[in-house]
Image (cartoon, helix red, strand yellow):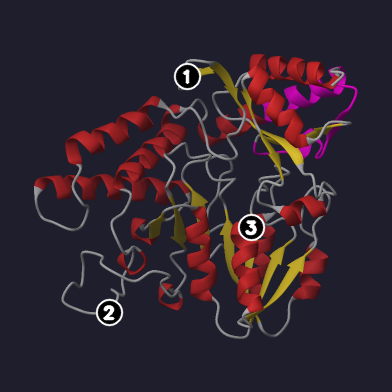
Amino acid sequence: MNESAGGRLIIYFDNAATSFPKPPGVIDAVVHFMTSAGGNPGRSGHPLSVAAGEIVFAARKAVARLFGVANPMHVIFTANATTALNLAIQGITRQGDHVITTSMEHNSVIRPLVEMERQGRIILSIVPCSPEGIIDMRALEKTVMAETRVMVVNHASNVAGTVQPLVEIGAFCRKRGIILIADCAQSAGIIDISVEEECVDLLAFSGHKGLYGPTGTGGLVIAENFDASRLSPLIFGGTGSFSDKPVQPPFLPDRFESGTLNAAGISGLGAGISYLLDAYPGGLKGVRVHKERLVNCFHEKAARDLKGYIACVPAPQVKTGVVSFNLRMRSPSEVARILAGEYGIMSRAGLHCAPLAHRTMSTFPHGTVRFGFGIFNTEEEIGIAVSALKAIEERND
């Protein structure tokens, strides 16, 4: 259990939205930056600016290590995964391109694609997935056309907690010369990912979810064998380099990092990654095992104690600690409101910014209650939550 700002004891099950609490080292890193570095990285030559630049570069190396990239300069920092996805999607597509995505995508993917389709810039195809959220590879095969240039895939669903076969999808795309953009907002920090082994060209990640960094952090990883000159910047401006020229620098990461970075947040992000890889017992495998154990524990207790429990995805298929469920005769919003207001249990209800995923899972339009278990959650907390759900189920109001 954790203590909220008001001093109330809470159980935090909303880690799929943003992780909480953060490891102490993350907080220490942000405070250290704000109190001991604090300069603008890459903008000046004085010691505080140099120190800030070194901290950002250390975080860049941590991200590169996490995703199996040898050159840290291929890590582009952005404000979040949404910005990274927009950079990748809008920066790589050209007029008349055919783009493929899936029926499990987050709005961070669907909305830019639909807008580009509305403007007549691209042709868009959405490949169906199973009710558990796994892509139909035969349908994908049939979707490819001569104009197909890009595929965007959500590696792990923020609704179902299931993981797409990224290696298979990557090989499929690489064989056909299709650029693969992977949305790893929900899988980073849980699933081992190598952009080389998965044949991913552009990988978007969130810093504040499974990587336990501060909000306002994320980025885009560009594969080393991918020609970055094919990607157009989304934002132009000052980079601290090529200051004598009115054009954007051509080299990485400056080409895509205009404006001052969230260096304090990036400092915390680097600490979060280091904690997961070097300090958490078992590293990423330990994270995955812990979350799968919590998912199994919740499903078993809920199925045993709750008469109206509806699990949207079987426990063995959930790989990221995300559980979507409903209680018969209770709306998701009502359940989440009572859990938070009366029991101090923080969850999320509704469509989770992924309406197509809910249509795929037949949970549209009301959505689900979503628990997102984190590395600091316990089986004891799950027992308390199931007892609360039982009490909600038995209410007469």
Residue lying furthest front: 397
In front of the other: 320 or 370: 370
Considering only vertical position in the picture, is 142 above or below 386?
below
Q: Amino acid at mark 2?
A: Val
Q: Quadrant of the C terminus?
A: top right
Check the image and report above or below for 344 versus 140.
above
Sequence order check: which comes first, mark 1 or mark 3?
1
Q: Which residue is mark 2?
A: 247
What whole-number distance in Å separates the C-alpha atoms at marks 2 and 1? 50 Å
Name the quadrant containing residue 243. bottom left
Residue count near mark 1 (Cα–Cα under 10 Å), binned few <14, some 14–19, many ≥20: few
Query: Tag 2, which secondary structure?
Result: loop
2 or 3: mark nearer the eye: 3
Residue 384, image x, y percentages? 69, 14
**Mark 1: which amino acid?**
Gly
Q: Are marks 2 and 1 in contact (CB under 8 Å)?
A: no
Depth-wise, is mark 2 or mark 1 nearer the camera? 1
Please state the horizontal and vertical placement of residue 185, each as a whole percent of the image: 56, 49
The magenta-colored residue range is 292-320
Instruction: Name the residue at 30% across, 75% down.
Output: 248
Write the residue at 14% across / 45% down. 48
The three-letter amino acid code for the residue at tag 3 is: Asn
Give 216 or 97, whichever is nearer the viewer: 216
What residue is disc 3 on?
107
Find residue 34 and report its horizontal and vertical position in percent: 24, 37
Measured Cα–Cα span from mark 1 to mark 3: 33 Å
| Residue 124 placement, left or right of 248 | right
Would residue 247 be counted in the magenta stretch? no
Residue 324, relative to residue 142: is it above or below? Answer: above
> What residue does disc 1 label?
6
